[in-house]
Image: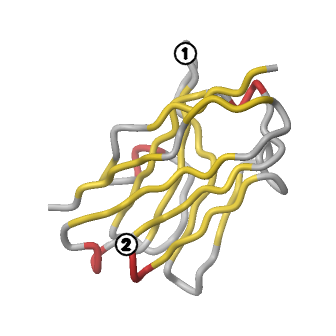
């Protein structure tokens, strides 16, 4: 069974950087698309970034485009989200998600596996 574990969250000042990681275990060979989502208190979970093994394609939410980068280290079964120029509105619980289908999608319901989340807090 696939398990995802996030780490790397923390408190950072506005304008700073942070990298969160997601380590996968189990039959990771079956996973083709990965996503990072976030959920702030009182808000719905929203798509942040996605990666597909189908040509290494990526997709970003408009709100993070140019500031965040998703990447994958296949040897370590790890997906990263590098976050730069952080803003207070980036504060949220960040979740890693994965699925066995190819195409990157932004709907959380289309991802089969989820981690527990890692908190990112950006102070102004």
Which residue occupies 56% across, 68% down? 51
Quadrant in the rendering for residue 16: top right
Q: Position of residue 102 (x, y in %)?
A: 45, 74
Q: How many residues crowd around disc 1 within 10 Å: few (fewer than 14), some, or many (20 or more)? A: few
Say the numbered circle drawn on residue 116.
none
Residue at the spot of label 2: 77
Residue 41: numbered disc = 1
Q: Residues within 10 Å of mark 2 (few under 14, many from 20)?
A: some
Mark 2 secondary-structure assignment: loop
Is tag 2's residue or tag 1's residue first in the polypeptide sequence? Answer: 1
Residue at horizontal 70%, vertical 61%?
A: 69
Q: Is residue 34 left or right of residue 121?
A: left
Given this view, does label 2 or label 1 mark the residue nearer the observer?
A: 2
- Indicate left or right for 27 with 6 as reference: left
Image quarter of residue 44 = top right
For the residues labelled 2 and 1, say whether their Cβ atoms are less than 8 Å apart: no
In percent of width and height, residue 61 lies at 72, 49
Q: Residue at x 59, y 69 (%)?
A: 71
Q: Quadrant of the N terminus?
A: bottom left
Res. 58 image quadrant: bottom right
Mark 2 to mark 1 CA distance (whole Å): 30 Å
- Residue 91 image point, x, y percent: 65, 27
Task: Determine whether 64 is above or below 103 in the image.
Answer: above
What residue occupies the far left of the structure in this picture? 1
In front of the other: 7 or 36:
7
- Residue nearest the viewer, comparing 66 with 80: 80
- Image location (x, y in percent) of residue 19: 61, 52
């Amino acid at each position: 069974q696939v398990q995802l574990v996030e780490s790397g969250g923390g408190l950072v000042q506005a304008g700073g950087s942070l990298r969160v990681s997601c380590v996968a275990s189990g039959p990771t060979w079956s996973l083709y698309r990965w996503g990072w989502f976030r959920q702030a208190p009182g808000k719905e979970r929203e798509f942040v970034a996605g990666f597909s093994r189908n040509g290494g394609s990526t997709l970003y939410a408009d709100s993070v485009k140019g500031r965040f980068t998703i990447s994958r280290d296949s040897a370590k079964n790890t997906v990263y989200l590098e976050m730069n120029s952080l803003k207070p509105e980036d504060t949220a619980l960040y979740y890693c998600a994965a699925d066995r289908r190819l195409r990157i999608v932004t709907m959380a319901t289309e991802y089969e596996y989820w981690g527990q989340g890692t908190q990112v807090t950006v102070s102004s």
